Amino acid sequence: MRAAALLLGLAAMANEARAAGGAHVVDDAGVETPGVCHLETWVTGHGAGDGSVTLAPACTRTAWPRVELGASATVARSGGADDTTFGPAVKLNLRPLESGLGLGIIASGSWSADSGRLESAALLAPVSVALGEGTRLNLNAGWHYSRTGERSHQAFYGAQVEVDLAPGWSAMAEAFGHDDGRTGAQLGLRWTPGGGTVDLDLLAGRYLDGATRDAITVGITARR
């Protein structure tokens, strides 16, 4: 039972709306470029054969330039047990990042492919602040539901700093958690070669799900 609960917790975290892109846990307030779609995919390992694989496509239509419609599917393994979850995500930009203070709303949910039950849901408010040339602060606060948690309804919080290091290179540091669990953290390096159609991410984190100590993540985002 403990392994199953941990597995579903991993899948729930993976299916929450992610941005600032890919496997980052804390989201920014921006949406994908209007008229562009992307596919985010990442693999997270926790050791001893435990981990998860996530695919997350999303698009922003030119007719709705402030709305990003997406979905995600995650296969997670913990203690030798597997579970697949999937669900939609919608992101609404209320104030553009270019203004210096970006605001947004994100709603998401995920269902278990085995049971058909709702495993997790989230309603978050991301805030993005320009701290200077090439430096951004992203803050998240909101509500999170988890069917397998000790408390089904929890508050979620997170903070992230993104820094442009050089053309095509950026770094990220973030901390996040729920009001009844251990605070997690993650550090990441991103390479965006050429014209920005592909992002490559390498991240190292602790307590991404509030319970598992170490995690290494490799991610790829492709845009078209």
Image (spheres, rainbow, N blue to C red):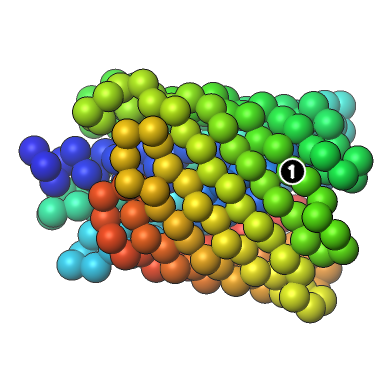
Q: Which image quarter is the N terminus in?
A: top left
Q: Position of residue 152 (x, y in %)?
A: 30, 22
Depth check: 72 or 19 in front? 19
Q: Is residue 53 left or right of residue 8?
A: right
- Vertical order, 106 against 205 (above or below): above
- Evaluate whether residue 125 shows in this view: yes
Neighbours of disc 1 within 10 Å: few (<14), some (14-19), many (20+): many
| Residue at image coords 37%, 60% | 206
- Vertical order, 171 against 91 (above or below): below
Depth check: 65 or 100 in front? 100
Q: Residue furthest left?
A: 1
Please give the count of numbered marks on the rendered protein: 1
| Residue at image coords 52%, 71% | 202
Depth check: 71 or 18 in front? 18
Q: Position of residue 2 (x, y in %)?
A: 11, 42
- Vertical order, 117 against 182 (above or below): above
Depth check: 185 or 81 in front? 185
Q: Residue furthest bottom?
A: 166
Task: Determine which quarter of the picture holds residue 177.
Answer: top left
Q: Position of residue 12 (x, y in %)?
A: 37, 38
Mark 1 residue element:
strand
Q: Residue furthest right?
A: 99
Amino acid found under the numbered disc labelled 1:
Ser
| Residue at image coords 65%, 51% | 20
Q: Position of residue 26 (x, y in %)?
A: 57, 46
Residue tagged 1? 128
- Vertical order, 17 against 189 (above or below): above
| Residue at image coords 40%, 52% | 184
- Evaluate whether residue 60 shows in this view: no
Q: Is residue 16 left or right of residue 77?
A: right
Task: Determine which quarter of the picture holds residue 185.
Answer: bottom left
